[in-house]
Amino acid sequence: MMKLELVALAIWMASILGGECKVVQFIFGDSLSDVGNNMHLSKSLAQASLPWYGIDFGNGLPNGRFTNGRTVADIIGDSTGLPRPPAFLDPSLTDDLILENGVNYASGGGGILNETGGYFIQRLSLNKQIELFQGTQRMIINKIGEEKSRKFFQESQYVVALGSNDFINNYLMPVYSDSWKYNDQTFIAYLMDTLEGQLRKLHGLGARELIVFGLGPMGCIPLQRVLSTTGECQEKTNKASSGFQWSLKQVTG
C-alpha cells in the first residue's frame, strides 16, 4: 500500500512540475483492458455487447468493457490517481484528449503474436497497437512540437497486459498451426522472444515507466473448466501459465 501511495505522489508531483503536460497512461492489452476499441471493429466477433457487460459500471449498459465493472486498466489508473484513457478507436478522440487522458489501445482477442485470435476476424495485436501508438506520437509532435512531446511520452505510464489469448485462442487450439509446431517450452520461448522485442521497441519510442502483467491460472477460467467432465481446472493450461510467468521474470527482471 505504501508503494502505491508513493507512486501516486510521484505521478502527482510530476504533473505539477512538468509544466504544460500532465502524466497519463498508454494501455496495451486484450479484453482485460479493452474499454471499447472492439466496438468500433465492425467485423470483429469479439464483442462485449451482451446485457451483463457493464451492469456495475456507469449506466449499467454494455460499454465495450469485457466485464461487469472496471477493467484492469481502470483499476490501475484509479489506484494511482491517473485519468482513465479513452479507446483509441473512439471517434471523439482528439489530440487534446490524448494530452489530458492518454490512450487505450487494448483489444479483445488480441495477443503478443500477430496470428493469435485469428478466428475473431478483427482484433488488434500488440504489434498493431504499437503501430497505432507511433501514429499517436506523430499526432502529438504536430500538436506541441518534438521536444515537449519527448518529455510527455517519457513521463507517461505504460501498461502492457496480454498473453492469455496466445494460449487460449492460439496454441491450445488445434486449428492453429502453432499448436502443432511447438511444445509448451518452445512456444513460451517464441512468445518471450516476440514480447522482448516489442518491449524494447516501446522503450525506444520513449516508454520509461513500463508495467508488464503476467498471467493468472488460465486453466481455471470457465472456458477451460468446461472442457473437463468434472468442471475442474485444466492443469496443463495452468502449467503453461506458470511457465509464462517464470520466463517473463527473466525478460523483465
Image (cartoon, rainbow, N blue to C red):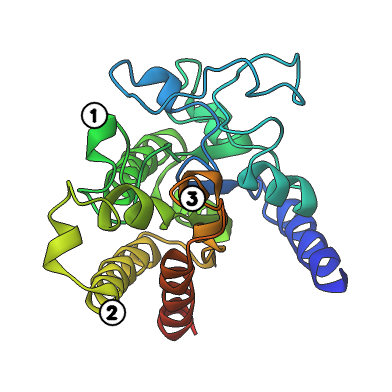
Q: Amino acid at mark 3?
A: Thr
Is tag 3's residue or tag 2's residue first in the polypeptide sequence?
A: 2
Task: Name the residue beneath numbered marker 1.
Answer: 121
Question: In the image, which disc is placed on residue 229?
Answer: 3
Q: How many marks?
A: 3
Mark 3 or 2, which is nearer the eye?
3
Q: Secondary structure at mark 1?
A: loop
Q: Is residue 181 left or right of residue 202?
A: left
In this view, 137 is above or below 7: above
Q: Quadrant of residue 44?
A: top left
Q: Amino acid at mark 1?
A: Ile
The residue under the point 52% across, 47% down is 26
The location of residue 69, given as percent across then percent down, is 71, 32
The location of residue 178, given as percent across then percent down, is 17, 59
For the residue pair 111 and 223, the one nearer the viewer reads as 223
Question: In the image, which disc is placed on residue 185?
Answer: 2
Q: Is residue 206 left or right of residue 122?
A: right
